[in-house]
Image (cartoon, grey):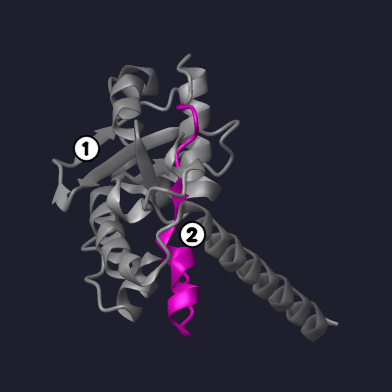
Amino acid sequence: AGVENDDRHDWREVRWMVIDIETTGLDPARDRILEVAAVVHESGRVEVPWHVLLDPEVAISPSVRSIVGEVAENAAGRPVFADVADELLDLVHQAVVVSCGAAEFDWPFLAAEFERAGRELPAPLPLLLDPLLWTGELSEKRCRNLADACRAFGVPEPRSTASQDACEATLALALELAPRLPGAPAAILELQDQSRAARASERAAARELRRGGAG
């Protein structure tokens, strides 16, 4: 059984793959990955960080270039995702995936790219952990992004917007928060679902408030 389906295992004690990606847009069915950075944490050790810039094989719009900057420059000649797919699958193997937006952003893009490259997804799928969703359970402060969460819990903020720095900060935040959370995979997934629902309700309430103010 995978970690997600086996509550005999504590997710805090297994292999983590902390990941951050940059993409050409927000739709995994149409947009592509430009950059992948990852850090593997296991048994208290951090393995050598993994990082690659990719040719997305699609045109990059000016609006995307303005956001991702040099990541989008000179993409021609870089490896394509299929070139690194097997190496990435090795990192994912028997690991939990940790990122801010793991289930909503990073994993859907990775899954779409693996399928395009003709690779089979891990079975069962990895447990997807999002430290940003944990912050609502552990603090009354509203943490909208990784930098907010780092400040709220006394963790060094990312040194830059680079994916490698985001990975390091995400790992530090996860290590800070993990001891305060339940170790059973089902319990952490339930907590994340509750946090996700609460955030969705807050966004809906804010939209209604704006509509009321405009009426």
Could you say where residue 68 lies in the image, as x and y percent from the top left? Answer: 37, 47
Can you give x and y, in whole percent of width and height, for residue 148 in the image?
Answer: 38, 74
- Please say whether residue 135 is one of the residues in the magenta stretch: yes
Residue drawn 55% across the image and 44% down it = 26
The kind of residue on which mark 2 rests is: Ile
Location of residue 96 (image quadrant): top left
> Where is residue 190, by image quadrant?
bottom right
Residue behind mark 2 = 188
Q: Which residues are magenta?
A: 122-145
Name the amino acid type tagged 1: Trp
Q: Where's residue 194, x and y in %? A: 61, 66
Badge 2 crowding class, 10 Å Cα cut-off, few under 14, some 14 to 19, many 20 or more, is many
The image quarter in which residue 82 lies: top left
Which of pointers 2 and 1 indicates the residue nearer the eye?
2
Q: CA distance from mark 2 to mark 1?
A: 27 Å
In-front residue for pair 147/9: 9
Q: Secondary structure at mark 2?
A: helix
Q: Is residue 191 above or below residue 9?
A: below
Q: Is residue 121 visible?
A: yes
Q: Circle 1 — which element? A: strand
- Marks 2,1: beta carbons within 8 A: no
Q: Which residue is mark 1?
A: 50
Residue 40 relative to residue 80: left or right: left
Q: Which residue is at the front of the view, 46 or 63? A: 46
Q: Is 4 placed left or right of 46 in the picture?
A: right
Residue located farthest toward the top when viewing the structure as drawn: 118
Residue for point 48% across, 85% down: 140
Q: Nearer the viewer, residue 151 or 94?
A: 94
